[in-house]
Image (tube, rainbow, N blue to C red):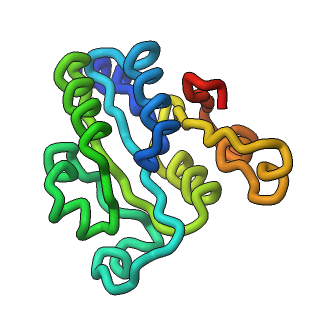
Amino acid sequence: MAGEAAAAERWVGAAVDFSEGSRAALRWAADNLLRAGDHLILLHVLKDPDYEQGETLLWEATGSPLIPLSDFSEPTIAKKYGAKPDAETLDMLNTVARQKEVVVVFKVLWGDPREKLCQAINEIPMSCLVIGSRGLGKLKRVLLGSVSDYVVNNATCPVTVVKTADGK
């Protein structure tokens, strides 16, 4: 019986940067993907590590341990990892956790978002990943490189890219 429960456990990943694009991706995941008993792992990548934060030095290579939503909602804990979650996203996540009966955890990573998201997908047995689109134009996407394009082409699990309501 315990083996059946473990087999049914799903880890759904979502890349979050606390932008409107990542909130749109979270809303889409909540409406279309998440079901009771799922684990929602939010991957937050910081491009420029703050080496004055002790946690950055400690966890830079592997990323932070999994941080429960209740802990990450505490400003002092989020700040310890260099994250700045907004109230709207935290409220949405608390509502999703309660209504959908899912376990929500954060993992903070430091470095290039493209590489770190793919690394996390390889290290955590995710069923899928949901990522928002920043809506870069073709030129900016070529010059800056699209995180979502890279992840779609290099991830080892299915990836869903969610555009914001304005089509970007």
Closer to us: 65 or 99: 99
Q: Is residue 41 above or below residue 55?
A: above
Q: Residue furthest bottom?
A: 52
Q: Quadrant of the C terminus?
A: top right
Q: Quadrant of residue 134?
A: top right
Q: Position of residue 110 (x, y in %)?
A: 47, 67
Q: Is residue 4 above or below residue 155?
A: above
* In the image: residue 73, left or right of residue 137: left
Q: Residue at x 32, y 48 (%)?
A: 106
Closer to us: 152 or 3: 152
So how many labels did they put on this image?
0
Q: Residue furthest front?
A: 166
Q: Residue at x 56, y 28 (%)?
A: 164
Q: Quadrant of residue 157?
A: top right
Q: Position of residue 150 (x, y in %)?
A: 72, 47
Q: Position of residue 95 (x, y in %)?
A: 21, 25
Q: Position of residue 133 (x, y in %)?
A: 62, 37
Q: Residue at x 42, y 30 (%)?
A: 26
Q: Is residue 103 above or below residue 7?
A: below
* In the image: residue 88, left or right of residue 10: left
Closer to us: 146 or 106: 146
Q: Quadrant of the N terminus?
A: top left
Q: Quadrant of residue 153?
A: top right
Q: Residue at x 28, y 43 (%)?
A: 105
